Image (cartoon, helix red, strand yellow):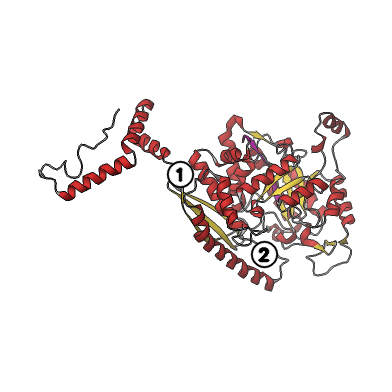
Amino acid sequence: VTIPNKPSRIAGAECPERSVVSGADHAAAMSVQEYLEKHLLPRKIEEAVNAAVRAKAADPVLFISTHMRRAAPAVITRVCARQILDSRGAPAVEVDLHTNKAVHRASAAGPGAPEGAAVDATRDVEKRRLLAKAVADSVRLINGKVSEALVGMDPQQQAQIDQAIMDLDKAHHRTEVGANAMLAVSIAACKAGAAEKEVPLYKHIADLVGKSATTLPVPAITVINGGTHAGNNLPIQEIMILPIGAKNFEEAMQMGSETYHHLKDIIWEKYGSDSCNIGDDGGFAPNISSITEGLDLVIAAIDRAGYNGRIKLAIDAAATDFCVGKKYDLEFKSAKKSGQNFKTGDDMIEIYSQLCSEYPLVSIEQPFDKDDWEHSKKFTTLELCQVPIVLFIFYLLSGAHAIMHLQVVGDDLLMSDPERIKRAVNEYTCDALTLKASQVGTVTEAIEAVKQAKDAHWGVMVSHRSGDTDDSFIADLAVGAAAGQIKAGAPCRGECLTKYNQLLRIEEEFGSEGVYAGENWRTTAS
């Protein structure tokens, strides 16, 4: 099919009543012709029509419009931010990134949200006031300088976009634009890049990482909350379950959900209905003060659900929250302190070691203060192990012995900071990374943190943050980065379920090609 270079009827030629073309009509006709030639429209339309003919398109108009749309490269035309509320009702940032083809939305929780019941009421009010101001400032910066810097850029060029954002905030802790505000823009750009390539978001992320994306992570499902995330007396922040014995992610979530509801029944029976309230991450918050008491409840729930041996335990101590000087106050939330629970770092090592010997505990996150490198190293080098000697010898001979000891995860210790990760690798102060993209600020920096952890043969746990939004980006990040682990809270609360539900959709898209990390939850990332 050949399209004429010049239109045969333009500006009134098709009207039989008009036999004379005025000067104005002649100028209009010329402008249409010039417009067509300037944008090479005859050639582009001809190519689209020929493509429709070759494809024998059932709907040629739809086919041609899609073909023409693909032929036009996407560029960013505007970035618009607004203030929304996160899962705690605190101010957060939402971004709409406009291209010449579509609008892509992303959100990130505001920085420094107040934590739980332990926060003093007066300071809490002041922190929220400062947080609201910080978010409002970020919104103004995004709508102004950030938008101006990104207009005209190709959304597929993630590294270039992130560098442009970073150039606007050279402060070490991203205090000018704000790490969370930067992240919302970066995620929106990442979504736009995937749309332009016409691939799922996880596939686009995998391309950025340089890996294939076929592995679904094991969920670290929160079932009990404590620490600053709940109003009980439990000092540690979370007790989690890992359904590593599931055959796929769908079954993993079924196992986790069933165990969660059995746990509710057990708590109800033992402590009453008022103990079934939930904490910030959706875990139950019974008024317990002992870590062992919490673990016993979870073990009972696993047993009642019939998943003994198929579900393992993990805890997030978040010990920075109860570190006082160089000691650890396990009664930091109690008004009446016994004085018996003020522990040294060595005492904490003994407590954790005892827990590992008595429970199927496979991972401990942030067991010490963020600056307690000494005891973090001392504990990690113990390489605590529950594996029967026969299995241990088998794994030793297969060269995979590194996966058999307890995983020690760095959160506050690392803050996803390249220099702190480097130090931890050199000093062996942990052997896994909690990846919170909000700690680094951009998708590119998050990917670099993953690569750094993988190079060290560490585990990688992609994590939400307490006080999150309903953006499901970390689900795609966990798959795209082949992390093997994801921590997104309980099978409860909308901001948690958006992540888990997105992973269910991704597994459905994979079909038979999808692989659940399962027993390989730590080695997938390496």
Asked where in the image residue 34 lies, by quadrant, the reply is: top left
Q: Report the disc number at residue 503.
A: none
Element on which disc 1 rests: loop
Residue 141 image offset from top left, x and y in percent: 54, 62
Hey, what amino acid is under mark 1? Ala
Residue 253 image offset from top left, x and y in percent: 65, 42
Question: Nearer the observer, disc 2 or disc 1?
Answer: 1
Magenta stretch: give its range.
211-222
Hey, what amino acid is under mark 2? Pro
Residue under the point 58% across and 44% down: 502
- Circle 2 sits on which residue? 114
Q: Tell me if mark 2 has few (under 14), some (14-19) or many (20+) residues whose alpha carbon lies within 10 angstroms of its own.
A: many
Left/right placement of residue 18 relative to residue 327 reads left
Quadrant (top left, top right, bottom left, bottom right) of the N terminus: top left
Of residues 284 and 172, the one drawn nearer to the viewer in this rendering: 172
446 is within the stretch colored magenta: no
Residue under the point 19% across and 45% down: 11
Residue under the point 41% across and 41% down: 72
Residue 75 image offset from top left, x and y in percent: 46, 47
Quadrant (top left, top right, bottom left, bottom right) of the C terminus: top right
Residue 309 image offset from top left, x and y in percent: 78, 38
- Cα distance between the residues tagged 2 and 1: 40 Å
Left/right placement of residue 151 relative to residue 162 reads left
- Circle 1 sits on which residue? 74
Asked where in the image residue 228 lies, by quadrant, the reply is: bottom right
Element on which disc 2 rests: loop
